[in-house]
Image (tube, helix red, strand yellow):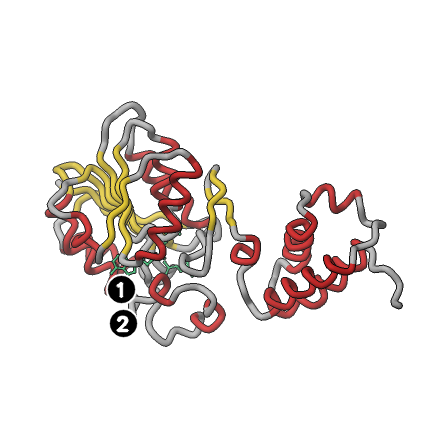
């Protein structure tokens, strides 16, 4: 019988195993072991000399192997933090990204507190953006759409668990919204071009959430084209896009008659979201 594995040794071995496929291998190893043991990462650090039970060694090894194969930590844990919310995520939804919080911040600047604004999040996935807005602006009426019924099931489960009121609608972009009008439209649509070199690394996430199957701008075009008819005068459209799509999205917004067209950069200084105002 082999010597008992300590938590410290298990973490070290896992970090080594994960290193080739993750640039946050140590953190990933800690999250996965904390998940197996049902404790916090801080507690792990205090228990470094403890032995890991054989069953836990096996469960941990299975998770580490999946992480090494590129599965996002969020799918392995079953949840992901976004804004101030803990969201359930499964492979039916994109793992919400920290840079998408930029869109939430921008949306909140456009939404005065205590106003009964009508907001829609197109392509809501896990519900991340819609739920963050509903949390921060309880007086707003928030609608969230997706063409994926499986994604909507996850999003509505998140709304229920968090006790947040969001109305969910199934359908392709504007088709999901009947003839409703909004004060604010936000969307993080699929914007990766078909065949893009980044897609293989994202293979565990739904392709529908990542790529429009065309040049990467098709979903953005569809949303922008339909937006003027669905926005009240003075209303805003805010869109996340790829780091090299800012100029194209600004041009689409201007061509659709939007004013005050501008782009915001992420923490790394890359163009990440663009928006405009319906005059
Ligand atoms: N809003 C979530 C977030 O930021 O984490 C998910 C964004 S994900 C990049 C894009 C979402 O758009 C996916 O949930 C996908 O199912 C949805 N989607 C793709 N094509 C769509 C379409 N034609 N109409 C509506 N939603 C669509
Ligand atoms: N931000 C995601 C990525 O680059 C892409 C999400 C999207 O297409 N909206 O991994």
Image disc number at residue 214? 2
Tell me where residue 33 appears, x and y as whole percent.
Answer: 69, 54
> Residue drawn at (69%, 64%), measured in percent from left and top?
61
Which is more toward the observer, 222 or 173? 173
Front position in the image: 278 or 41:
41
- Residue 111 percent coordinates (x, y): 29, 32
On the image, which quarter does residue 270 sit in?
Answer: bottom left
In front here: 133 or 157? Answer: 157
Q: Secondary structure at mark 2?
A: loop
Instruction: Kindly state the secondary structure of the residue where label 1 is placed.
Output: loop
- Is residue 238 visible from the viewing direction of this image? no
The circle on residue 217 is: 1
- In the displayed structure image, the side of residue 239 where residue 277 appears, left or right: left
Instruction: Indicate the position of residue 128 as horizontal and vertical percent values.
Output: 40, 46
Image quadrant occupied by the C terminus: top left
In front: label 1 or label 2 = 2
Identify which residue is drawn at 32% across, 39% down.
107
Contact between marks 1 and 2 (CB within 8 A): the answer is yes
The residue at the point 13 percent across, 48 percent down is 178
């Amino acid at each position: 019988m082999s010597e008992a594995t300590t938590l410290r040794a298990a973490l070290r071995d896992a970090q080594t195993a994960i290193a080739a496929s993750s640039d946050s291998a140590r953190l990933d190893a800690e999250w996965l072991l904390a998940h197996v043991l049902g404790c916090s990462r801080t507690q792990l650090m205090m228990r470094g000399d403890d032995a890991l039970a054989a069953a836990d060694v096996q469960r941990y090894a299975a998770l580490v192997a999946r992480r090494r194969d590129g599965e996002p930590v969020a799918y392995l844990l079953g949840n992901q933090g976004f804004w101030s919310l803990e969201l359930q995520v499964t492979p039916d939804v994109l793992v919400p990204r920290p840079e998408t919080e930029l869109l939430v911040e921008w949306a909140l600047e456009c939404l005065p507190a205590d106003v009964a604004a009508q907001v829609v999040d197109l392509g809501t996935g896990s519900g991340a953006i819609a739920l963050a807005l509903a949390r921060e602006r309880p007086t707003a009426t928030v609608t969230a759409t997706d063409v994926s019924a499986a994604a909507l099931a996850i999003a509505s489960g998140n709304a229920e668990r968090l006790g947040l009121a969001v109305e969910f609608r199934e359908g392709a972009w504007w088709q999901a919204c009947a003839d409703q009008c909004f004060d604010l439209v936000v969307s993080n649509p699929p914007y990766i071009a078909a065949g893009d070199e980044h897609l293989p690394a994202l293979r565990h996430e739904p392709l529908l959430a990542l790529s429009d199957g065309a040049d990467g701008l098709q979903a953005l075009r569809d949303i922008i084209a339909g937006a003027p008819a669905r926005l009240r005068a003075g209303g805003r459209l805010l869109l996340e896009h790829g780091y090299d799509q800012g100029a194209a999205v600004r041009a689409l917004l201007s061509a659709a008659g939007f004013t005050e067209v501008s782009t915001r950069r992420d923490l790394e200084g890359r163009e990440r979201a663009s928006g405009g105002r319906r005059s």
